[in-house]
Image (spheres, helix red, strand yellow):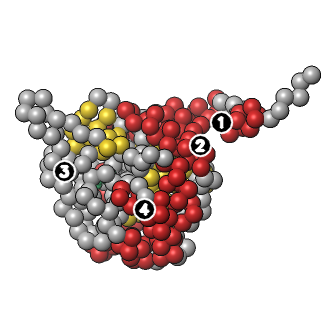
Amino acid sequence: MTVAVGRVTLEHPVVNGSGTLDALAAEAAGLHVAAELAAVVTKTVTPLPRAGNPPPRIAETPAGMLNSIGLANPGIDAFRSTVLPRMRALGRPLVVSIGGFAPNQYASLAAALRDEDGIVALELNVSCPNVESGCLSIGSDPNETRSVTARCAEAAGDLPVWVKLSPNVADVGVMARAAEEGGADALVAVNTLRGAAFDRASGAPLLGGPGGGLSGPAVRPVALSAVAACRAATSLPIVGSGGVGSGQDALAFLDAGASAVAVGTAAFREPLLARRVREELAGLLAAGAGRPSRAESRARSAQPSTAA
Ligand code: SIN
């Protein structure tokens, strides 16, 4: 089950989506979720502490969930002094998600984290739809994406840089290529799809923040399409993210061109989901040994027929 995501070797292909797991709180509650993950991905850290968006911050929708958290986090200083040492003590590889409101903020975060032990990669969040500026405004512009990736790749030293892309763009392949040109090691595809919901009785928005992001099974086909587009546009390894709730779902992401998958929304109901996904995927891969991969099938169908 070992997979390589660029320079990072993972024990198996299942990680968590940034912001969907408080691994420390889970541990305190006796749920050893981190142990089930090939790497633990942190909530996005920004330069300064952020309280996040006003409540309500989540709302259920048919086959999905809307969130508008607004990048609530303690800021990089408290993250390094308080959170990171406890995350490190979990004994799992850490991927730290970083976000900001201008390219220099991402680069300063990368520089602050480059020499910290236990971190195997940085994930650039250029795709959060729930803040007024930064993040998605960077990730929906190929020049900004290329430039912020290049600045972080330089500032991060030997630390691999993954770029988390948004489905809220006309062509995610263009953003994937920009990240590759900027020196990304891997892509994470995708963050949430912009969404909104309104209370039937009052007509008021169900979320308190300025934006909302849809996740869960409803977005899986969107995420699979984005992974396939990234696969076609670049040669970077991809972590597929969006509605993974079973080994079968994970296999679909591998078929679309991903090397690993992130679980998120479904783990709110089933905290140890990562274990089930990994076990089901292992079974499916063993049962399907010899099944041509999507890439092999494509290559075969592209070859001229030699039949008489
Ligand atoms: C949030 O904090 O609003 C969600 C994180 C994200 O969409 O990247």
Query: Which numbered disc flags the more N-terminal residue, 3 or 4?
Result: 4
From this view, report whether residue 144 is shown above or below residue 39. Answer: below
Q: Mark 1 points at which residue?
A: 294
Tag 2 or tag 1, which sits nearer the N-term? 2
Q: How crowded is mark 1: few (under 14 residues within 10 Å), some or many (20 or more)?
A: few
For the question of whether residue 33 can be seen, the reply is yes
Q: Which residue is drawn at 32% across and 40% down?
A: 214
User: SS at mark 4?
Assistant: strand
SS category of the residue bearing label 1:
helix
Foreground residue among 12 and 244: 244
Return the x and y of residue 243 as percentages of the image width and height.
41, 37
Q: Earlier in the sequence, mark 3 or mark 1?
A: 3
Mark 3 is surrounded, within 10 Å at the Cα level, by few (under 14), some (14 to 19) or many (20 or more) other residues, namely many
Label 3 lies in ligand 1 vicinity (Cβ under 8 Å): yes
Q: Residues within 10 Å of mark 4 (few under 14, many from 20)?
A: many
Looking at numbered disc 2 in the image, what kind of residue is underneath it? Gly
CB under 8 Å between discs 1 and 2 = yes
* Mark 2 vs 4: CB contact within 8 A: no
Q: For marks 3 and 2, give the CA distance.
A: 34 Å
User: Label 4 sits on what residue type?
Assistant: Leu
Secondary structure under badge 3? loop
The amino acid pointed to by label 3 is: Gly
Say which residue appears at 36% left-offset and 45% top-offset: 192
Query: Between marks 2 and 4, how big is the CA–CA gap?
Result: 21 Å
Q: Where is residue 15 in the image (x, y as percent from the top left)?
A: 46, 49
Tag 3 and tag 2, C-beta contact below 8 Å: no
Mark 1 to mark 2 CA distance (whole Å)? 8 Å
